[in-house]
């Protein structure tokens, strides 16, 4: 077990202390580094009064769902799955720049209904301090639904989350950032089950080839591949390029390109004027 700094130990103790104030707590659980850590600590503190909730929809990759389930089961973390139907909401499917607001509104609405029916006092998410200054319309929905953010309130940064996850031997401590499949589609381009399926199949293939950090940005019949900068050199291999080209063609893309800047989180926001959309 890797040790943690005194500063992080203080934050960890603060987090556990704050969690004792909740009677029963639902955790929005996706299998990402933040929500895994939060559900683990909440479960350690509250025991059977903690429950993770996975929102299942076409925008959640099947491989991510399977991984979230495995982690929960490996660490004896209780969870349920709720089917969410955000893609049936025109506000979401039309894919405005603040699409995440409508997604989270639906997700937290479903979780809120479950909480009310089963006697849970609060809903928590994995927001940390580094999320606060970013453009995240989903946070407004969380605020409206009175979702609490224990990691943020205890002063956790993203690095703190990773360091404590490693200390607790959680396999997600170095997991790349997680985002829903809809985030690969430019604002204004409609989100459909077919486009989400195409993106998922393309990204599954990149994972099969051994790429670790990647996104397939969906521009109708064009796939723009982002990989970690240190993995770009793999595309110099003619065989790799040919395999990707052939597979993506089968999936339904006409043109397949490589983004020369590599993967960067939130690159689709470069197409958005954040001053014209809802901000938190």
Image (spheres, rainbow, N blue to C red):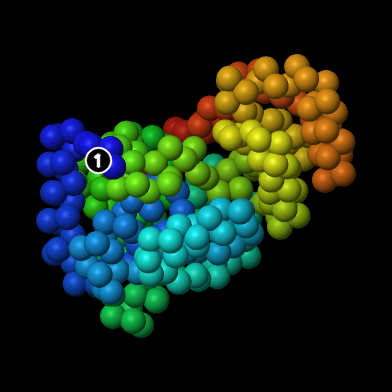
- Looking at the image, which residue is at 59% across and 62% down? 57
Find residue 203 and report its image quarter.
top right
Count of marks placed on residues: 1
Q: Which residue is mark 1?
A: 156
- Looking at the image, which residue is at 32% across and 57% down? 40
Quarter of the picture holding the C terminus: top left
Horizontal side of residue 203 vs 145, given as left or right: right
- Looking at the image, which residue is at 26% across and 56% down? 41
What is the x, y in percent for residue 104? Answer: 45, 57
Residue 70 vertical position relative to residue 171 in the rendered view, above or below: below
The front one of 93 and 198 is 198
The front one of 147 and 6 is 6
Q: Is residue 275 visible?
A: yes
Residue 194 vertical position relative to residue 187 in the rendered view, above or below: below
What is the x, y in percent for residue 215? Answer: 62, 36
Find residue 27 and report its image quarter.
bottom left
Q: Is disc 1 placed on a helix, strand or loop?
A: loop
Crowd rating for badge 1 (residues with CA inside 10 Å; few <14, some 14–19, many 20+) = many
- Looking at the image, which residue is at 28% across and 80% down? 119
Find residue 17 and report its image quarter.
bottom left
Residue 63 vertical position relative to residue 225 in the rendered view, above or below: below
Q: Is residue 199 visible?
A: no
The front one of 145 and 241 is 241
Going by the picture, which residue comes out furthest to the front?
Answer: 1
Horizontal side of residue 12 vs 132, given as left or right: left
Quarter of the picture holding the N terminus: top left
What is the x, y in percent for residue 6? Answer: 13, 35
Horizontal side of residue 115 vs 206, given as left or right: left
What is the x, y in percent for residue 117? Answer: 36, 82
């Amino acid at each position: 077990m890797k040790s943690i700094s005194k500063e992080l130990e203080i934050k960890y103790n603060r987090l556990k202390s704050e969690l004792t104030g909740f009677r029963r707590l639902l955790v929005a659980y996706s299998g990402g580094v933040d929500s895994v850590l939060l559900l683990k600590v909440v479960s350690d503190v509250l025991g059977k009064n903690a429950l993770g909730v996975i929102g299942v929809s076409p925008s959640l990759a099947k491989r991510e769902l399977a991984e979230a389930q495995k982690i929960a089961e490996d660490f004896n973390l209780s969870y349920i799955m709720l089917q969410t139907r955000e893609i049936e909401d025109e506000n979401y499917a039309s894919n405005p720049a603040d699409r995440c607001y409508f997604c989270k509104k639906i997700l937290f609405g479903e979780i809120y209904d479950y909480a009310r029916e089963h006697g849970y006092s609060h809903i928590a998410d994995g927001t940390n301090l580094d999320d606060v200054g970013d453009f995240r319309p989903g946070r407004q929905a969380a605020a409206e639904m009175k979702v609490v953010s224990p990691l943020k309130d205890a002063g956790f940064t993203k690095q703190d989350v990773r360091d404590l996850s490693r200390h607790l031997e959680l396999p997600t401590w170095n997991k790349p950032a997680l985002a829903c499949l809809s985030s690969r589609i430019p604002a204004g381009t409609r989100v459909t089950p077919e486009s989400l399926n195409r993106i998922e199949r393309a990204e599954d293939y990149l994972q099969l080839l051994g790429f670790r950090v990647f996104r397939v940005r969906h521009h109708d019949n064009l796939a723009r591949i982002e990989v970690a900068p240190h993995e770009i050199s793999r595309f110099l291999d003619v065989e790799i390029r040919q395999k990707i080209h052939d597979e993506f063609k089968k999936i339904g893309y006409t043109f397949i390109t490589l983004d020369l800047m590599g993967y960067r989180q939130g690159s689709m926001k470069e197409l958005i004027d954040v001053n014209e959309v809802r901000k938190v």
